């Protein structure tokens, strides 16, 4: 009888340790996903600010169409709280940056402006960082979701309320990085 009690206690201990291990894995992945998302938000905010600085730097030399200035103002006020807002901000930033480049290309005087060249190089660097962070985020989401769907970890996930996480999706029309060539 005592032996059966020890076996049951041993089995329960193993099961509890396994559940704790799976829980800790989910918590680590969840926190990694949140951290990656916040880093993407910071990088995208930096990009929005740099595009605004590019507009400010070139404004005196360029005749901007009103929509570019309006969109830059909208971008600066965007809330980057969720994946949908992040995707909208990304689309808007790429659109505005592309239009800004197109307008600026019509002004040869801008081509030699060192601050403009430096801002463009900085924006390219931030674009690369955003791309890397999106990859990391989606990779962590995939790991989290796969862990939540596999046996037996899916049982622990459903018991502890770990549901699927959403991938960051970017529409095909904005998948291409904006043209960042120097004027």
Image (cartoon, rainbow, N blue to C red):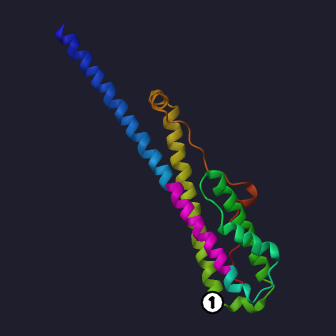
Residue at 58% of width from left, 63% of height from top? Answer: 130
Under tag 1, what secondary structure? helix
Q: Nearer the viewer, residue 79 or 14?
A: 79
Q: Position of residue 9 (x, y in %)?
A: 25, 19
Q: Quadrant of the N terminus?
A: top left
Q: Position of residue 100 (x, y in %)?
A: 75, 76
Is the stretch drawn in magenta largely helix, strand or loop?
helix
Q: Residue furthest left?
A: 2
Residue at 63% of width from left, 57% of height from top? Answer: 86
Q: Quadrant of the C terminus?
A: bottom right
Q: Position of residue 27 (x, y in %)?
A: 42, 42
- Dividing the picture into quadrants, the one containing residue 85 is bottom right
Q: Is residue 168 left or right of residue 102?
A: left
Q: Nearer the viewer, residue 63 or 176?
A: 63
Q: Against 77, is 86 above or below?
A: above
Q: Which residues are magenta?
A: 36-54
Q: Is residue 118 left or right of residue 152?
A: right
Q: Position of residue 154 (x, y in %)?
A: 49, 30
Crowding at dot 1, Cα within 10 Å, few <14 / some 14-19 / many 20+, comes out as few
Residue at 50% of width from left, 31% of height from top? Answer: 150
Residue at 18% of width from left, 12% of height from top? Answer: 3
Q: Is residue 46 magenta?
A: yes
Q: Against 172, is 145 above or below?
A: above
Q: Is residue 162 magenta?
A: no
Residue where numbered disc 1 is placed? 114
Q: Is residue 69 left or right of residue 118?
A: right
């Amino acid at each position: 009888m005592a032996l059966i009690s020890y076996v049951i206690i041993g089995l329960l201990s193993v099961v509890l340790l396994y559940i704790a291990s799976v829980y800790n894995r989910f918590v680590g992945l969840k926190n990694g996903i949140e951290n990656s998302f916040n880093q993407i938000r910071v990088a995208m905010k930096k990009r929005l600010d740099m595009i605004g600085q590019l507009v400010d730097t070139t404004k005196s030399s360029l005749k901007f169409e009103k929509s570019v200035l309006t969109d830059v103002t909208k971008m600066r006020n965007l809330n980057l709280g969720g994946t949908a807002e992040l995707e909208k901000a990304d689309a808007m930033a790429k659109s505005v940056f592309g239009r800004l480049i197109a307008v600026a290309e019509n002004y040869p005087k801008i081509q030699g402006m060192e601050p403009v060249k430096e801002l463009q190089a900085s924006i390219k660097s931030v674009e690369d960082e955003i791309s890397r962070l999106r990859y990391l985020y989606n990779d962590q989401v995939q790991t989290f979701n796969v862990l939540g769907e596999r046996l037996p970890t899916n049982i622990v996930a459903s018991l502890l309320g770990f549901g699927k996480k959403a991938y960051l999706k970017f529409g095909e029309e904005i998948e291409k990085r904006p043209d960042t060539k120097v004027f």
